[in-house]
């Protein structure tokens, strides 16, 4: 038996789109399981005008990044609010950011900072930022098939149904067709919540079905032993590599043998054509070809292979799990993957690194100073530099987001607590008007002062940058059309 691009660990009930392909089942009628998993409703959606962004990379800072210590600093606020860091000027007059992100100061001409994001869906609720549905949940540590699909899943669904608008011809990938041998949606470095032995909601196919879940990698994180032992406020860097699960052929299953079994299936198809409609046969053939393409292509594995990378490139990104994942994200979009998510996750129950997510209830400033901000600054600036040098930044939309922000007032443990009433998201690259500030917070970064933005507005902005019409719907499990925006409106003012 052959398992390809599958995972022995399931992050939710049922089979994911790329969960299991059993080569032994290819020799029996009806046994080709992956095309069954890939089968989707062929319901074309509305065609949109070409988007300026061809690809999306979401950099998700799990836990709630303290954006008033990054993007929206308040130097004139009281000491118990403004914190320990100082703002510095950037290459765009009027845009100041934290002094601990010196490399990012060089990229504000490509950035749009949205300082007025807010929602009332509850703390650590990751569903809104992935799906646009702002709805409180009874349980933020599990997911349901009835939830709406994530942005990445919607993009893959539209690509499968032929409703995804083509990007404008530009850059090094201009005119190249979408690579159907690669998945349309990749999630790294592990499923959301794995590090805590939970399953957070959001980045899944939802009611579209598990076939539209991302190709989700696995990882084996570990603490950096070259640094002092982790203590509260001085976490170790998390090292490791995102891994494609089960991505090699067992010795007993060669491509020749697989090809022979494919020949048998093609013979069976001739009999099936007498029993099925032309549409069904066409769909079956397309899905089968996609299954074989995924099985035999080496492109996905090549994107995940960093052994041939220049050591200087690895050093520039940072030899951390987040750095490696971000470098692979660049290689994936360069290869043709449309939507990639890299999460800076929390590994409380997997590796002893003290505190690795952005949920800084204690010693917020020492954690940001020694760990979070230097690594973020290094990795993201390397990504922006590489995309620019390859002519890809103008067609790649980068979104930096969290599920919430942090309190204006510093608590008794030198930390900041949960806060959903005002925080920042940042856009770079494709489809974005650079050097832009949108919305504002009050004098303490506590509440929105001007131009409030919902999480559904953020998702709507991503869709519009890709050229996906605001009228787009996807079918729920009963076939009822559901808007992908859930009431959101694209932020036209930051789009070029």
Image: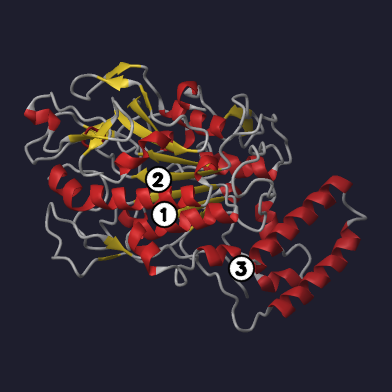
State which tag comes first along the sequence, 3 or 1: 3
* Residue 6 in view of the camera: no
Q: Number of callouts in the render? A: 3
Q: Is residue 144 above or below residue 314?
A: above
Residue at the spot x=20%, y=40% of the render?
99
The extreme top residue here reads: 450
Q: Are marks 3 and 1 in contact (CB under 8 Å)?
A: no
Residue at the spot x=12%, y=54% of the render?
232
Q: CA distance from mark 2 to mark 3?
A: 26 Å
Residue 13: mark:
none
Q: Does dot 1 land on a helix, a strand or a loop?
A: helix
Residue at the spot x=27%, y=59% of the render?
349
Label 2: few (<14), some (14–19) or many (≥20) C-alpha neighbours in 10 Å? many
Which residue matches tag 3? 298
- In the image, residue 87 lies at what x, y percent? 19, 34
State which tag comes first along the sequence, 2 or 3: 2
Which residue matches tag 2? 59
Q: CA distance from mark 3 to mark 1?
A: 20 Å
- In the image, residue 284 lies at what x, y percent? 78, 54
Q: Is residue 399 above or below residue 409?
A: below
Which residue matches tag 1? 326
Q: CA distance from mark 1 to mark 2?
A: 8 Å
Label 1: few (<14), some (14–19) or many (≥20) C-alpha neighbours in 10 Å? many
Residue at the spot x=63%, y=42% of the render?
157
On the rendered structure, is 281 left or right of 175?
Answer: right
Q: Does dot 2 land on a helix, a strand or a loop?
A: strand
The image quadrant that residue 325 belongs to is: bottom left
Q: Are marks 1 and 2 in contact (CB under 8 Å)?
A: yes
């Amino acid at each position: 038996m052959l398992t390809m691009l599958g995972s022995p660990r399931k992050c939710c009930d049922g089979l994911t789109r790329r969960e299991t392909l059993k080569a032994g089942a290819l020799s029996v009628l009806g046994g080709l399981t992956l095309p069954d998993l890939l089968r989707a409703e062929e319901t074309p959606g509305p065609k949109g005008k070409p988007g300026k962004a061809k690809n999306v990379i979401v950099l998700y800072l799990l836990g709630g990044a303290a954006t008033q210590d990054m993007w929206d600093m308040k130097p004139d606020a009281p000491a118990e609010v403004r914190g320990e860091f100082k703002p510095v000027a950037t290459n765009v007059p009027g845009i100041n950011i934290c002094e601990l992100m010196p490399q990012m100061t060089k990229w504000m001409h490509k950035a749009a900072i949205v300082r007025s994001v807010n929602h009332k869906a509850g703390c650590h609720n990751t569903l809104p930022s992935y799906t646009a549905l702002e709805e409180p949940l009874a349980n933020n540590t599990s997911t349901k098939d009835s939830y709406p699909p994530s942005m990445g899943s919607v993009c893959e669904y539209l690509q499968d149904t032929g409703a995804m608008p083509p990007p404008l011809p530009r850059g090094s990938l201009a005119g190249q067709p979408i690579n159907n041998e690669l998945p349309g949606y990749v999630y790294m470095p592990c499923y959301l919540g794995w590090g805590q032995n939970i399953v957070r909601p959001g980045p899944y196919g939802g009611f579209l079905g598990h076939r539209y879940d991302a190709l989700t990698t696995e990882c084996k994180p570990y603490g950096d032993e070259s640094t002092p032992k982790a203590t509260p406020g001085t976490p170790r860097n998390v090292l490791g590599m995102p891994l494609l699960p089960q991505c090699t052929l067992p010795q007993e299953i060669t491509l020749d043998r697989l090809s022979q079994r494919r020949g048998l299936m093609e013979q069976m198809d001739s009999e099936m054509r007498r029993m099925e409609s032309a549409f069904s046969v066409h769909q079956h053939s397309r899905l089968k070809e996609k299954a074989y393409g995924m099985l035999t292509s080496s492109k996905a594995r090549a994107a995940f292979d960093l052994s041939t990378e220049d050591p200087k490139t690895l050093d520039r990104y940072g030899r951390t799990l987040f750095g490696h994942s971000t470098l692979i994200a660049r290689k994936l979009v360069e290869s043709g993957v449309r939507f990639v998510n890299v999460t800076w996750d929390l590994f409380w129950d997997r590796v002893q690194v003290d505190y690795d997510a952005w949920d800084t209830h204690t010693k917020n400033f020492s954690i940001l100073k020694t760990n979070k901000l230097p690594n973020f600054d290094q990795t993201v600036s390397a990504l922006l530099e590489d995309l620019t040098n390859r002519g890809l930044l103008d067609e790649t939309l980068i979104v930096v987001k969290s599920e919430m922000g942090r309190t204006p007032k510093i608590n008794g443990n030198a930390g900041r607590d949960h806060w959903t009433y005002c925080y920042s998201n940042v856009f770079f690259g494709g489809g974005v008007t650079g050097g832009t500030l949108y919305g504002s917070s009050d004098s303490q970064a506590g509440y929105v002062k001007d131009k409030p933005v919902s999480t559904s507005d953020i998702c709507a902005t991503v869709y519009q940058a890709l050229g996906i019409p605001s009228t787009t719907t996807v079918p729920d499990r009963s076939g009822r059309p559901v808007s992908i925006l859930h009431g959101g409106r694209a932020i036209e003012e930051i789009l070029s």
